[in-house]
Structures are given as structure tokens and as C-alpha cells.
Image: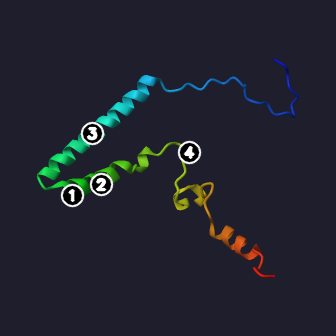
Amino acid sequence: EVAQPQGSTSQPPQNTVIPLPSCWDQSFLTNITFLKVLLWLVLLGLFVELEFGLAYFVLSLFYWMYVGMRGPEEKKEGEKSAYSVFNPGCEAIQGTLTAEQLERELQLRPIVGR
């Protein structure tokens, strides 16, 4: 390896290997998801025959919303919230439109027709 001077920045190695998930892991998750959807469809058909299809569908939607939400204890270390008031120092995430940015953009916009 060649020694680089103190002021230069070092680049990461070009042949970095990123491990990909194995085919078995992907097919297992796909099979489980497929079986869950299939079970839901079979139960939906059963409840439609019992004339409770709409109730089953609506309760399923509530269940999916409940399962899809994460609690604060499931937050990863260093992960920022989409709501800046919950971040340290009220720091906004990248791509958030702030009031200050909107005001700057509105004031610098040229007048149309001149």
C-alpha cells in the first residue's frame, strides 16, 4: 500500500463486499407473506359467506394499521423522527420544507410579467 500525505483524504477500498441475503431467507419471507395473504383471503371468503365480510375487512384494516405502527422503544439508535419537535434540538430531517425556507423562496421569486 502507498502511504498518503497527511492532507489528502483516503478513499474506501473499491472491492468492498456487501453480503446479500441468501435466496433461502428471501424465499422464506416471501412464502410466509404469501401464506398470510392466502389465509386472509380464505377467511374473507368464509366471512362473506357468513355475511360478515365487511366487518372482517374493516377489522383487518384496523389490525394492519396497529401492526404497522412502531412504538418509541423500537426506534433505532440515531434515527430521527419525521416530526422535528421530537428530535434533539428540534432538528428537521433532510428534505423538510421549513417556514424560513418558504419565506426566502417567496421573497426572492421574480415578479411575473415584468
Are discs 1 and 2 less than 8 Å apart at CB? no
Q: What is the number of the mark on residue 38?
A: 3
How many numbered badges does the structure rendering display? Answer: 4
Residue that numbered label 4 is attached to: 78
Q: Residue furthest bottom?
A: 114
Are discs 4 and 2 less than 8 Å apart at CB? no
Residue that numbered label 1 is attached to: 54
Query: Between disc 4 and disc 3, whose residue precedes?
Result: 3
| Image quadrant in which the C terminus is located | bottom right
Are discs 4 and 1 less than 8 Å apart at CB? no
Camera-nearest label, 4 or 1:
1
Residue at the spot x=62%, y=23% of the render?
A: 17
Say which amino acid is labelled 1: Leu
Say which amino acid is labelled 4: Gly
Q: Rounded to the nearest whole Å, what is the CA distance between mark 4 and mark 3? A: 37 Å
Q: Secondary structure at mark 4?
A: loop
